[in-house]
Image (cartoon, rainbow, N blue to C red):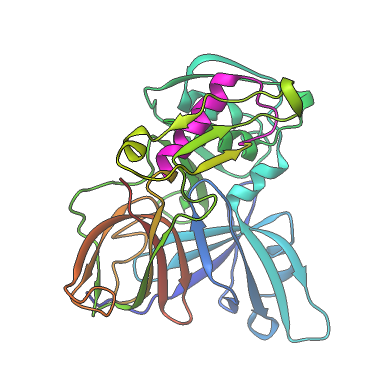
Amino acid sequence: MTGAPLELAWYACDFRSGHIIEDLPALRPTGVLSKLLGAHTSTSFELALGGAPAGWEAATEEGRTLLVGVDTETDLPIWAGDVLTRDGGSAQTVTIGAATVEAYLERRYTGDQLLIQQDQATVITSLMSAPLVQGPPFVMDAPPTGVLMDLTLLDADDRTVLSAIQEVMGLDSGPEWTIDVEWSDASHTGFVLPVRVRPAIGTQAAQPEGTFDYPGCVVSYVLSGSYESGKGATIVTARGEGEGAGRLSSAPQIATDLEAAGWPRRVHRFTPATGITDPDALTAHAAKALALMKAGAQAWTIDAVASQAPRLGRDWFLGDTVRIAVETSPRHPNGADVVARAWSWELDPAADRIRPILVEES
């Protein structure tokens, strides 16, 4: 598979409305662009003033503007970032720092929330009620997950929306979420930011069409396995805040199948979030952590030529499963053919490189 070099057209937008203010052909990332399920990432840019439009200052004002990168071959937006820092002076360039829009949720608070036996998608939509007011152009895309839960928060707890949504995602059978970017209309005058909530983000196909092949579009790869502290365990306990006998604790979650098969016991204890006062919620966090940790971490780090690899935003998205096909390599002399899930990605347009982190899920 060979396509055009992955070039991005950059747009400066009003952060509240998503409306395009200026095209920025003289803007280029100086760090990699990246996305991660349920969290935010950041990067830096350089704007050459010699090629900047006359209104570049208003178009890149920190706290008020949004940068969006659009793949010029597919005309699909693939990255959006909130401008947070801007530095310039005697140099011919201005340095800009931006974070993916999930970071904005650190600046909004949940208020009072009393949610009893509500669908997980309803809970996250309720938590988003504050950012939906006088915030960026969020659009909720949260169909019912079929899983009910309770959540009680007080405004006095000072819980950010980001921490609360991440807590929900961290529960056993908790939903996944991410914030995407799309054109707002057919005439391409601006962008919206869909807040996606699903039991699992993306498409998990047993035989996905997108294939990263080595030799082929993949320049190099590393398969990493780890049972280090924090990455592997056979017993997990989630603990609340506090000290001594009054400290809340989950019931220990035990990988009885592994221990019965002769695995040595390894224990992991952690505090999942601030303000949890329900032992059942702690147990749900512990159960999800054990499901992720009992087999340890198995992840493929791929370095591929972006113009030759399956196209990000068209052939695969964050959360999708993709195929890794190795004909032969020192690590896999007899080859390997694996389906793994894209939990994050890094894109370096200038180097024509795409680097997904692909996790094998049991």
| Range covered by the magenta-colored residues | 272-292
Q: Is residue 16 left or right of residue 63?
A: left
Q: Height in image: 88 above or below 138? A: below
Q: Looking at the image, which residue sits at the far right?
A: 90
- Front one among 323 and 310: 323
Where residue 254 sits: x, y (%)? 43, 32
Residue 148 quadrant: top left
Is residue 306 in view from this perspective?
no
State the quadrant of the N terminus.
Answer: bottom left
Whether residue 294 can be seen here: yes
Residue farthest along the top direction in this orientation: 116
Q: Is 289 a magenta residue?
A: yes
> Which residue is painted at 53% across and 31% down in the image?
168
Q: Which residue is depicted at the point 46% across and 82% down?
A: 351
Q: Main secondary structure of the magenta part?
A: helix
Q: Is residue 335 left or right of residue 86?
A: left
Q: Is residue 12 magenta?
A: no
Question: Quick one: 172 or 181, which is closer to the camera?
Answer: 172
Residue 81 percent location from the top left of the image: 59, 58
Question: As drawn, is 215 to the left or to the right of 251?
Answer: left
Residue drawn at (79%, 24%), measured in percent from left and top?
A: 156
**Closer to the camera in the image, 110 or 132:** 110
Image location (x, y in percent) of residue 135:
66, 41
Which quadrant would the C terminus be assigned to in this image? top left
When the figure is inspected, residue 358 is found, relative to residue 280, above or below; the finding is below
Picture residue at 37% right of the left edge, 45% below the top:
263
**Count the marks: how many?**
0
Q: Which percent across, then down, holds residue 358?
A: 37, 59
